[in-house]
Amino acid sequence: MSLSISELQEIHDFASKLSRRAGHYLRGDRARSQTQILPTKEKLNSVDLVTAVDEGVEKLIRDAISTKFPDHAFIGEESYSAGEEKRFLLKDGPTWIVDPIDGTVNMIHMFPMTAISIGFCINSIPTVGVVFAPFLGGHGTLYSAINHPEGGAWMSEYGATGPSTNLPTASPPPPLPKDAPKGCLFFGEWGKDRRDSPESNLNKKSTNFINMATEIGGRGGKGGMVHGIRSLGSSTMDMVFVAAGQGDIMFEAGCWEWDVCAAQAILLQTGGIVVDSNPPPNISDDDPIPMANLGGRRRVFYVLYLAIRACSIDEDGRTPRTQQEALVRAVWKRTERFDYERPM
Amino acid sequence: MSLSISELQEIHDFASKLSRRAGHYLRGDRARSQTQILPTKEKLNSVDLVTAVDEGVEKLIRDAISTKFPDHAFIGEESYSAGEEKRFLLKDGPTWIVDPIDGTVNMIHMFPMTAISIGFCINSIPTVGVVFAPFLGGHGTLYSAINHPEGGAWMSEYGATGPSTNLPTASPPPPLPKDAPKGCLFFGEWGKDRRDSPESNLNKKSTNFINMATEIGGRGGKGGMVHGIRSLGSSTMDMVFVAAGQGDIMFEAGCWEWDVCAAQAILLQTGGIVVDSNPPPNISDDDPIPMANLGGRRRVFYVLYLAIRACSIDEDGRTPRTQQEALVRAVWKRTERFDYERPM
């Protein structure tokens, strides 16, 4: 099944408007909350939070989609989490994958790295992506794309009627740094698993951050001397900054399809790649690197993502893909293996 | 010496306009750089960078100030760094303390957490502060304050002629979380010192982050279960988010007066506090906590800052200062001592 570019454009424009409507709802709610602490419910633990607003935004989005596209499937974080059925639901038909609020903790604290993420897949491929950060700038910031040869990717910072900028922000995007990860901007999160044990995910993440940051030659050769490590508290925003070319590497373990589907559509359209943040077993330096797929029977990997930004051919004549794959291998060599399991 | 509120208002309005002019200059430069990599010079190492733009922005600001206020002193990061004289220069007279670009690495990568920081001191007290983030939102985001009983603090996201919001964003600001640091949003940076040794600043910072993030009871009782750890790559932006009430704790070791002077004026006006991130030797739980001062002979501490946001009286009747000081002690118990030395 495929849709024409004009059908995709209609879906893109609908999703963009819908994300702004949801953002308006959120901004109103935040205004109401400014004299009180927002009531929250704990999911996994005291840092895994959901507010009534998360559920309200998801309902707003789901209702609008089912009215406009009654035949399309819908996967949303909150209805998924609340449901009994934990098997993965992505099929080949037109499917919306929605995270009503990524960065709920940030929103509670009024830190503006919060995103409404609306993705649309066909054949399990992220094809339209809309990520709206309603608190980033006075008008909010909308990142969006149609992943299609005749599509495009855009950033809009001046409201629905204002001008937008093509993505990636630099055109053409510069080559990756010659000795990458040295010189790269690296995005990663501490996450919600806070258990204390030597083999914990928290300790592995910290090992990764130190490896990436340490000078070349340090950490038994694992020192990566990246330009910087950024933790924003939203894996959607991490990926969208890499998609826009406002960062180089996004490494995440423990996120979900709704965290990345929309951002992935933008990243793919700009020329970035996404692979598993755990290397496939026994992969050699000459083997091609499989790209990460979303869900369904085609899904090779669980919830582990490593994204690299778009780039141009470099001084040595290396193609973008050659540079990107070399950087993937360089990151794999400096990072720990994770074993996040999808609950069944 | 003191200035009237109308004189301070004039200084505030002048600094705000000047920061937007500098931001316009930066945005223009970034537009020019979008097809090439910005040329940089290394200072300490390959992640401590300065661009010709940093120096150009500092000159623009210095020239404007010396024309308008020829009798005022001026301390700027780039001229300080380039000079032979490394003793600290802050005197009691009217003094401007300017960081032309905080977050240079972010700017090179086009990640929007970059700030122009213009502070104004009298009697070594941060009295007017303007922090402009020119890439945050389409119009940039301006945080500013006059630290004075008749002053105020504001955030402006809609350009020079648009409306502004009073700070802190929540009014009144909510109490700190009851079991803080549990439930807090914590801002800290990995920094530019990337040497690999067990006692390195890099390893200490990582220890702090893990302690703050781990579940209560973990890490030998040091687990703080904060809501999240955020690293933005700009200590100015970290402090300004705490000043605005968009975060709870900012912990930095290894930053300079120009990184914090303007943000500190905003923080003080909103009701936040700043102390040394190293506890004073032999301080007991009952001793009052000295507030951090900027530079000069009055300066007790070096380049180590711990900031806590404004808050209101809590359910148990604890005053804001009592809650803030309790949180300072709780952070001190979970963090390592640093020994950054000011070069002489």
Image (spheres, coloured by chain):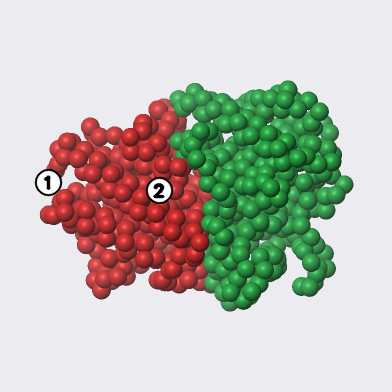
Chain colours: A green, B red
Residue pictured at 33% horizontal, 35% vertical? B161
Front residue of A65/B35: it is B35
Mark earlier in primary sequence (2, 1): 1
Relative side of A257 to A184, left or right: right
Question: Residue B1 has which mark?
Answer: 1
Residue pictured at 32% horizontal, 58% vertical? B57
Q: Chain of mark 2?
A: B
Q: Residues within 10 Å of mark 2 (few under 14, many from 20)?
A: many
Res B81 → quadrant: bottom left
Q: Residues within 10 Å of mark 1 (few under 14, many from 20)?
A: few
Q: Chain of mark 1?
A: B
Front residue of B242/B203: it is B242
Tell which tag, 2 or 1, sits nearer the viewer.
Answer: 2
Q: Percent from the top left, x then y, of residue A6?
A: 70, 37
Question: Residue A237 has which mark?
Answer: none
Q: Amino acid at mark 2?
A: Pro
Res B337 → quadrant: bottom left
Dot 2 falls on a residue whose secondary structure is: loop
Residue pictured at 24% horizontal, 42% vertical? B12
Q: Percent from the top left, x then y, of residue B335?
A: 49, 55
Q: Percent from the top left, x then y, of residue B88?
A: 24, 63
Question: Residue B134 has which mark?
Answer: 2
Front residue of B235/A247: it is A247
